Image (cartoon, grey):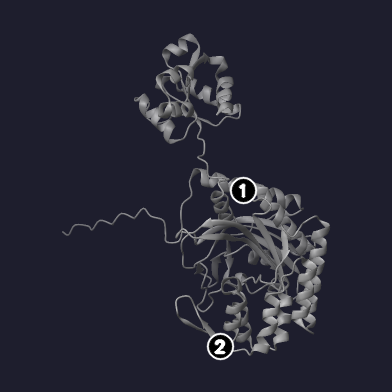
């Protein structure tokens, strides 16, 4: 009889494009989410937690890769033949929620949402298929005052989480202005319009001269490869150049230059007027150009924006993997999307919102050294006598009731040295020791592990005597002494 073939053991590895998060990373993210939620709540937005799974039909086709069915999302077919997928952002689910519950919700409806989203895209360095977003949106408000408020809130949020003024700028543009420029160019063909938009998006990389070449016959890139151009004449390309170079010394100058760039376009004029209103409202709120700036070069990638668009960029420099200096870049974006809810209701519903990439924002703070210090572990109550676990549990409960993070050692207590090694691995600040002798005398030993480690590394024998790292205190003073040591650390 043939032997039954053993099943191979599963490989202990994360799937491609995903990663695991431990201890301090999770704590830092939770802290940031709480800070962001506090700002959103202060602005009057209500929390919403929607399903992580939506029908593919509800999600729509707004990701860049749409050539194949369900491209860009993690999708599967249910038994009843409906295709469902993990959400790829938090905005498409909001459109479904508002359409579904609109008769029960206030208008405008102001909500914020936080959580993971999933994109079935090619992973790369620092680019994962699961990541966190923090969104805030106003649905049902046609006034661009709602857009101005989102920009102000974004500025406040960045400063709250630790990005000071001068290290960021919120850039604001308007898709209507861009449409006005395309109208002034006389570009009606949809593929050609898309090609122009993609070229505009390269302005920060190739500059004015590069955009001129790409709008015309084409150009050689840095690798020597020739990139075909859009094929516009110089006269057709001129409104784009005027648009991209319209940044002035202040908002008034920029708006004046934009009016010249759009020519007689009515939709373009509407866009400039909306930007002017936003600038006026932000100025009234005390937000300067060092915080929020009208910037014609902002072109958001997703297809559903219909009016103002905004992007938060961190302006401080970092070093890339090759040691070259570069700006950190964008951590947030959003805009007005008046047609998204219409997919469900058949009626246009004005909406505007912003999404913050939490993982990128955390990475930025780590780059600046504002987070990422080693997390402190719990106080460890060691076990000297396994028959006295109730005593040790009483001790740890007293510490916890005093608001001190603490735990009893729950491994094998036979080797005391292993208990201290465990405390070191946990980054514990203090170990508490109570053996039989200490119990009889009504005392405990409290070991300052952080000071002890520093002294062991750097101090002479004389300094050991001057700065003791272990204390004997009455059992009744245990909590007070632990608090004293923690405060000193």
Q: Using a 10 Å C-alpha cutoff, classify the residue at mark 2 as few (fewer than 14 neighbours), some (14 to 19) or many (20 or more).
A: some
Residue at the image position 59 percent from the left and 89 percent from the top: 231
Q: Relative to 135, is 270 above or below?
A: below
Q: Earlier in the sequence, mark 2 or mark 1?
A: 1
Q: Which residue is mark 2?
A: 217
- The residue labelled by disc 1 is 32
Decide which of 330, 333 is in the foreground and name it.
330
Q: Position of residue 29 (x, y in %)?
A: 57, 48
- Image spot of residue 185 (x, y percent): 70, 86
Query: Dot 2: what SS?
Result: loop
Image quarter where the C terminus lies is top right
Side of 150 relative to 13 (left or right)? right
Q: In the picture, residue 182 is in which quadrant?
A: bottom right
Whether residue 398 is visible: no
Give me the residue at 54% from left, 53% from top.
Answer: 363
Viewer-side label of 2, 1 = 2
* Separation of residues labelled 2 and 1 (CA atoms): 48 Å
Compare residues 229 and 349 and report the one nearer the observer: 229
Q: Answer left or right for 442 relative to 43.
A: left
How many neighbours does mark 1 have within 10 angstroms: few (below 14), some (14-19), or many (20 or more)? some
Give the mark count: 2
Q: Is residue 104 left or right of residue 323?
A: right
> Residue at 52% across / 41% down in the picture?
373
* Residue farthest along the left direction in this orientation: 1
Camera-nearest residue between 421 and 44: 421
* Position of residue 65 measured from the top left corner of the image (x, y, whole percent): 53, 75
Q: Is residue 215 above or below residue 365?
A: below
């Amino acid at each position: 009889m043939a032997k039954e073939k053993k099943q191979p053991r599963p490989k202990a590895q994360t799937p491609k494009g995903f990663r695991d998060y431990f201890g301090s990373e999770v704590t830092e993210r939770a802290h940031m989410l709480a800070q962001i939620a506090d700002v959103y709540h202060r602005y009057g937005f209500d929390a919403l937690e929607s399903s992580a799974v939506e029908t593919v039909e509800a999600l729509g086709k707004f990701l860049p890769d749409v050539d194949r069915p369900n491209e860009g999302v993690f999708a599967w077919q249910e038994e009843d033949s409906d295709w469902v997928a993990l959400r790829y952002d938090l905005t498409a689910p909001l459109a479904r929620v508002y359409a579904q519950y609109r008769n029960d919700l206030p208008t405008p409806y102001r909500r914020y949402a936080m959580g993971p989203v999933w994109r079935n895209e090619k992973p790369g360095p620092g680019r994962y298929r699961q990541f966190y977003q923090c969104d805030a949106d106003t649905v049902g408000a046609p006034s661009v005052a709602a857009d101005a408020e989102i920009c102000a809130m974004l500025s406040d949020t960045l400063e709250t989480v630790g990005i000071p003024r001068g290290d960021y700028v919120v850039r604001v543009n308007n898709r209507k202005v861009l449409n006005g420029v395309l109208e002034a160019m006389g570009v009606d063909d949809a593929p050609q319009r898309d090609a122009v938009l993609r070229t505009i998006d390269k302005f920060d990389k190739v500059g004015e001269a590069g955009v001129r070449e790409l709008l015309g016959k084409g150009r050689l890139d840095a690798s020597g490869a020739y990139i075909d151009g859009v094929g516009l004449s110089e006269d057709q390309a001129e409104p784009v150049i005027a648009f991209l170079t319209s940044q002035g010394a202040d908002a008034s100058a920029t708006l004046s230059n934009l009016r010249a760039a759009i020519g007689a376009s009515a939709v373009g004029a509407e866009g400039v007027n909306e930007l002017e209103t936003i600038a006026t409202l932000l100025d009234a709120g005390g937000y300067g150009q060092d915080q929020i700036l009208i910037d014609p070069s902002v072109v958001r990638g997703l297809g559903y924006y219909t009016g103002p668009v905004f992007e938060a960029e961190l302006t401080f420099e970092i070093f890339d993997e090759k040691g070259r200096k570069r700006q950190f870049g964008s951590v947030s974006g959003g805009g007005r999307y008046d047609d998204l809810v219409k997919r469900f209701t058949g009626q246009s519903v004005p909406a505007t919102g912003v999404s913050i990439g939490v993982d990128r924002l955390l990475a930025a703070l780590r780059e600046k050294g504002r987070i990422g210090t080693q997390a402190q572990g719990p106080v460890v109550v060691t076990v000297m006598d396994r028959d006295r676990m109730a005593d040790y549990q009483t001790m740890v409960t007293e510490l916890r009731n005093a608001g001190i993070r603490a735990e009893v050692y729950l491994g094998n207590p036979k080797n005391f040295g292993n208990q201290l090694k465990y405390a070191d691995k946990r980054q514990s600040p203090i170990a508490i020791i109570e053996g039989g002798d200490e119990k009889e005398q009504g005392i405990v030993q409290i070991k300052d592990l952080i000071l002890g480690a520093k002294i062991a590394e750097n101090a002479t024998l004389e300094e050991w005597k001057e700065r003791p790292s272990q204390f004997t205190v009455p059992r009744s003073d245990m909590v007070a002494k632990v608090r004293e040591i923690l405060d000193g650390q």
